[in-house]
Amino acid sequence: MNIRPLPRRPAPLRDELLSSWIARLADANHCSMAELCGYLGIASEHPPETFDELADVNIERFCAIARLLPHDMHSMLITRRAEFPIECVSWSDFQHCPTCTHATPGVSLRHWRQAWSLVCNSCASGLLPLRDDPRDKYQVPSRLQARACEGARQLEQVYLRGNHHAARRVDLTILVVGTLAPEFRQGMLFTQNSRDRYSMLSALNHGLMRPLLATALAMRNDPAAESRLRAAFPHQRKILDRLRRLKDSLPIGKNVYGRSRVARNSGQGVTNPVAGRPEYLAAARQAIEQLGATADRGELLQHAERIWETARKKPMDIS
């Protein structure tokens, strides 16, 4: 059988999905997707996106018809880590870049499918959901965006490195976040609500950076959180008891941002905050002396927590 290359061939964009390029190839040659897939030797009427979907395809014939190098074709496919405990690459498009789609209608890039992608790698524009969520009425605050970007960076590093221990920690963080806030499930990484997705990535950042402190803060703000955690993790009594002690040592009336709920709602400052336990305050003072008063608040909290835990295991004078 003679192989006749397609007469019209739009050039693939950098990081474009193979399925996206085949769809544009069909439009350029004025044929349906099913007809083009059949001519390319693809059994399904839908273009392939992974290596597994190309198992029964004659790669040499496919590349000759499409005038595409095998290496370039492989670089347009999605790869997933089967051993990773959570799904980080969407099975369908859930976000897009307005600038790129306006320049090339119908295009879809591979990194748009990744849970940690918040900015387009091609034009540096912010990625937007494919559909408008009616609940997404307010602009995402800048501080939430910053924390979400940090959480996205951490998730990308863990996924690309393939570290089993770090992957398990991500999975545990997702489980804890879902227990503390049932609306934040794993699917929130691909939600069409921008604020919810940024909140999920921000929660992931808190869970990976300082999991004990973040969980203790959530337990303090929600009286029922401890019972939900004990029901979800019945074999983790020691760590839950440790979290309860840490929760009881935290100052009352402050949240992660240092302002009470009443103050946020009323716009008034906090008055007469209740002090924490002396040993925790002593650890905080020692952390400030060692790192300096201008150190990052997150680093100070982490350092104070380590000092406090060391003092609990081996009694010592931290004043």
Image (cartoon, grey):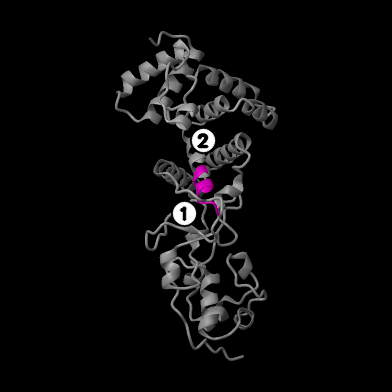
Label ID, residue 207: 2
- The quadrant of the picture occupied by the C terminus is top left
Residue denoted by label 1:
117
Q: Residue at x 54, y 21 (%)?
A: 247
Where is residue 191 shown, x and y percent of the image? 57, 52
Foreground residue among 152 and 59: 152
Q: Which residues are magenta?
A: 192-199
Q: Quadrant of residue 280?
A: top left
Q: Residue at x 58, y 48 (%)?
A: 188
- Residues under labels 1 and 2: Cα distance? 19 Å
Label ID, residue 252: none
Q: What is the crowding at mark 1: few (fewer than 14 residues within 10 Å), some, or many (at least 20)? A: some
> How many numbered marks does the figure carry?
2
Query: Identity of the amino acid at label 1?
Result: Ser
Does dot 1 land on a helix, a strand or a loop? Answer: loop
Q: Is residue 256 visible?
A: no
Q: Residue at x 32, y 28 (%)?
A: 295
Relative to 276, is 26 on the left or the right? right
Where is residue 131 shown, x and y percent of the image? 55, 60
Question: Can you say whether 174 is above or below 44 in the image?
Answer: above
Where is residue 248 shown, x and y percent of the image? 54, 17
Query: Identity of the amino acid at label 2?
Result: Gly
Q: Quadrant of residue 168?
A: top right
